[in-house]
Image: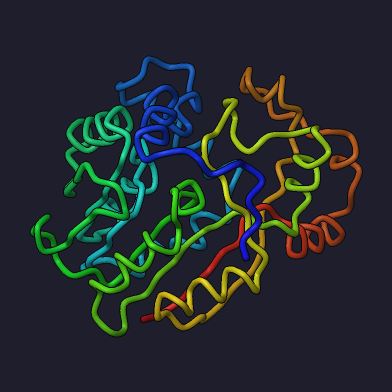
Amino acid sequence: MTSKPIEISATLSDVEEYWDTRPCNIRHSANTIGTKEYYLEVSERRFFVEPHIKEFMSPADWAGKNVLELGCGIGTDAALFSESGAIYSGIELSSKSLEIAENRFSLFGLQGTFIASSIEDFNIAVANIPSPDLVYSFGVLHHTVNPLSALLNIANQCKPGTEFRIMLYASNSYKYAMIKAGIDQYEAQNNCPVAFTYSQEEASKMMESAGLEIIKISQDHIFTYNVEKYKKYIYEKEPWFECMPEPQFKALKENFGWHLLITARK
């Protein structure tokens, strides 16, 4: 059973409205939204604060291959896949996020296909996109109303051998401990309508229920910066993290990181 810290009475419309109001990572730059400077700073900030994302994506590995992203947001990871030569397709529930992602691809001359859809309702054949070699989703499934149903819908449409790389929130984590203590919250904005967390065992069972074989599962990412200064683009670590030796911090991330990184195969 997954941890359900939020009462699940929300609908897809509630989820869409929430992310339309403030798309994920939209404030990763103080530049004007839609400019080249804005997009470049958004990418720089994302991969500086969460460097494990690039390693998890392995974008160069997917050059010339078909990548389907579930929940592309404002297109930050999408751009990296496209720049690395992947044949990219992304779906997104939030129309505002999709607009920003599409603008990025147009502005930088990137190739890719974007489709407005929920994961639960998405149909690869109707969308007329290639069968994916990789299904990628970073921090999205745990915000859907029924994560297993959404995952099953995609997995059932994929060919054997399709790889899945998915990040879910970890219940056995420093971040979740702070949330339960009332010190932190799930997202930068308040009142997230749906947020599930998973133990490694729970995540593995969900993958297996969708017909996916686990290749690797690990944890990473603890946010170390002073939040108020971070909002002003000042990267100053909290003193308890600043004084922590790297081997100890690495052990902390690997055992209590917020991001549960799952690689699986159909």
The percent coordinates of residue 89 (x first, y second) are 22, 54
The residue that appears at 41% across and 22% down in the rendered structure is: 21
The percent coordinates of residue 48 (x first, y second) are 58, 42
Based on the displayed image, in which of its 4 quarters is residue 247 positioned? bottom right
Give the left or right position of residue 143, taking residue 233 as reference: left
The percent coordinates of residue 171 (x first, y second) are 70, 56
The residue that appears at 23% across and 55% down in the rendered structure is: 122
262 and 249: which one is in front?
Answer: 262
Based on the displayed image, in which of its 4 quarters is residue 98 positioned? top left
**In this picture, is 46 found above or below 255?**
above
256 and 65: which one is in front?
Answer: 256
Give the left or right position of residue 166, taking residue 231 as reference: left
Give the left or right position of residue 110, taking residue 50 as reference: left
**In this picture, is 76 found above or below 40?**
below
The quadrant the C terminus occupies is: bottom left
The residue that appears at 62% across and 61% down in the rendered structure is: 2
The quadrant the N terminus occupies is: bottom right
The percent coordinates of residue 256 (x first, y second) are 76, 58
